[in-house]
Image: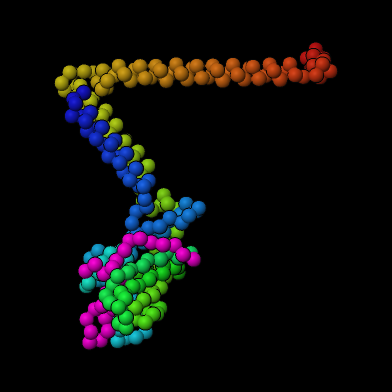
Amino acid sequence: MPRCVQLLVLFLIICSLHFVLAEDESEPECTIAIENTGNIIDLRKLRRESGDDWEVTNDNSEVQYKLNVCHATQRLEGMGAYVKESGDGPVGLGKYSSKLEYRNNKAVLTYKTGDPCKYSSLRRASVIFFSCDKSVDESNAPVFVADVDKCVYVFEWRTPVACPVPKNQEGMTGVGLFFTIFFIALLVYFVGGIFYNRMVHHASGISQIPNSGFWKEAWCFVRDMTIIICAQLSLSSCTRSSQRYRNVPVEESNILIEEEE
């Protein structure tokens, strides 16, 4: 089998292991695992990397709020949310973040270090509470709740995207990716090896399989081990049966003898 094919197979397996280990280290950004449930909240569907930002529903028509999820807004670079009042330019309400928290059955996203507050030297910030609501669709917009001294802004977002789902439903997990790449590696190994042996060595039959001698020995090993294990299990079963009859009281053993007669 050509060395290049062997190196390709080894490379694919190493890549799959890398993805598995990387996933085990931390959760994907803009998601949060709910402790002791096996569920996860994934808000990546709400992230807008292009086009318009999310426009916040607000009773005051003279004030406009816009925000993005785990991504900077299109209007203000680096800011996850901003406010624009009539006659004024946009004011940043905090730099975007992809780190979620889980409080009171809600996912919480906090943007900090925005533009200076209106009445103090502090920096503006915004807090977005995501509530699970399956009665609305994914296009449902966030709602402005309140601001504290024109410095901290609070938003509520009711969306089905914020509903917890089993972790394995968020997409292909690292384990799934490992087996997918491993299967591809085996496919490349066998198909490439067979093609090489047929074209170069003019092999036929079983000898077409790359390293056919190894696979023959492996099959014999598995077969022999299976026979040995089955024999051991059968012997153990007979031994237990023998011990069970040896432990039968004399009276009961006589009854069994009489019934046989």
Q: Main secondary structure of the magenta part?
A: loop
Inspect this view and state whether residue 255 appears.
no
Asked if residue 232 shows in the view, the reply is yes
Number of labels in the image equals: 0
Tell me: residue 114, above or below residue 170: below
Q: Residue at x 37, y 42 (%)?
A: 175
Q: Position of residue 26 (x, y in %)?
A: 36, 50
Q: Out of 153 and 175, give the one closest to the viewer.
A: 153
User: Which x, y percent locates residue 165?
Assistant: 44, 56
Question: For residue 201: magenta?
Answer: no
Residue range corresponding to the magenta coloring: 77-104
Residue 86: x, y in percent? 25, 86
Residue at (15, 21) in percent of width and height: 200
Q: Residue furthest top?
A: 261
Measured from the top left, where is residue 84 in percent x and y? 26, 81
Please identify the residue farthest to the front as the structure is shown: 121
Task: Locate residue 45 relative to residue 245 in the image: left or right.
Answer: left
Residue 95 on the magenta segment: yes
Return the residue nearer the eye: 48 or 154. 154
Where residue 245 sits, quadrant-wise, is top right
Colour scheme employed for the rendering of this structure: rainbow
**Quadrant where the image shows the N terminus:** top left
> Where is 28 relative to 96, above or below?
above
Q: Residue extending furthest left?
A: 200
Q: Residue at x 31, y 35 (%)?
A: 183
The C terminus appears in which quarter of the rendering? Answer: top right
